[in-house]
Image (cartoon, rainbow, N blue to C red):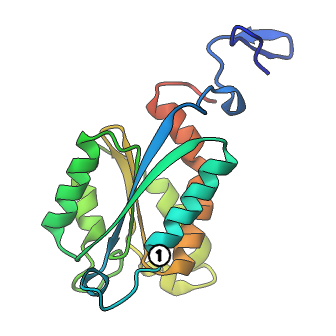
């Protein structure tokens, strides 16, 4: 618990600055997320994007539960490397906090998402995607064919998710568990 001056008191010991997640004063900060659905068919209007809107809802619900403000922009683009690269660079330059892509993480000829994203990352975060593949691949071996990557691009977190709504649910369940700690680390706060 924090006192009136923001000092965290834990077992009678004062720590400053407070790094307890529940005490960080972030309700006034507005986080920005960009959701990019990669789908040739959805970008042409031949197929309704279901994973992007689901991801936006899950992300909004998570931030609401955390008492944090969030602005979400969702776009649908074709499976084209230069288009994705442009959107990622734009997100980095405009200070977007998180980019979530959905689609294009498999091994098909048009699945380019992890390849493009990996080239733009300053730091990779392989653990989260490895854990997700192993956890869900144990019961559904096809999950092991996902090549999703995660990392940091400047100060922007980037996560590449498969395009199925079920996979979006599964990935978000794990990614959301580490988001708060990732924000602390990006801010230079030791949250351990």
**How far across and down, in percent of the image, does residue 138 sit?**
61, 79
Q: Is residue 40 left or right of residue 162?
A: left
Looking at this rendering, what residue extends furthest in the bottom direction? 46
**Label total for image:** 1
Looking at this rendering, what residue extends furthest in the left direction? 82
Who's the residue at 49% across and 38% down the image?
Answer: 30
Who's the residue at 42% across and 51% down the image?
Answer: 33
Given residues 138 and 62, the one toward you in this image is 62
**How far across and down, in percent of the image, does residue 76 sit?**
31, 72
Instruction: Tell me the quadrant of the picture where the N terminus can be found.
Output: top right
**How far across and down, in percent of the image, does residue 168 sit?**
52, 72
- Image: 186 above or below 106: above
Label 1's element?
helix
Looking at this rendering, what residue extends furthest in the right direction? 11
State which quadrant residue 14 falls in: top right
Asked whether the viewer can see residue 177, the reply is: no
**How far across and down, in percent of the image, does residue 164 sit?**
48, 81
Who's the residue at 39% across and 67% down the image?
Answer: 148
Q: Which residue is mark 1?
A: 51
- Image: 31 above or below 174: above
- Image: 69 above or below 173: above
Who's the residue at 71% across and 11% down the image?
Answer: 7
State which quadrant residue 112 falls in: bottom left
Disc 1 crowd rating (10 Å Cα; few below 14, some 14-19, many 20+) is: many
Given residues 34 and 189, the one toward you in this image is 34
Given residues 179 and 137, the one toward you in this image is 179
Asked whether the viewer can see residue 46, the reply is: yes
């Amino acid at each position: 618990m924090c006192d009136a001056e923001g000092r965290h008191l834990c077992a009678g010991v004062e720590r400053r600055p407070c790094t307890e997640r529940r005490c960080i004063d972030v309700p006034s900060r507005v986080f920005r997320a960009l959701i990019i659905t990669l789908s040739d068919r959805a970008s042409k209007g031949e197929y309704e994007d279901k994973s992007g809107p689901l991801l936006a809802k899950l992300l909004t619900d998570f931030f609401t539960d955390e008492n944090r403000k969030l602005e979400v922009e969702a776009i649908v683009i074709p499976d084209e490397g230069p288009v994705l690269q442009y959107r990622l660079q734009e997100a980095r330059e405009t200070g977007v906090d998180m980019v979530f892509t959905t689609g294009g993480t498999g091994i098909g000829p048009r699945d380019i998402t992890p390849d493009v994203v990996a080239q733009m990352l300053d730091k990779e975060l392989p653990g989260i995607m490895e854990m997700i593949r192993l956890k869900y691949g144990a019961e559904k071996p096809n999950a092991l064919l996902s090549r999703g990557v995660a990392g940091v691009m400047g100060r922007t977190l980037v996560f590449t998710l498969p395009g199925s709504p079920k996979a979006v649910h599964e990935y978000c369940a794990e990614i959301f568990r580490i988001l708060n700690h990732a924000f602390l680390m990006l801010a230079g706060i030791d949250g351990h």
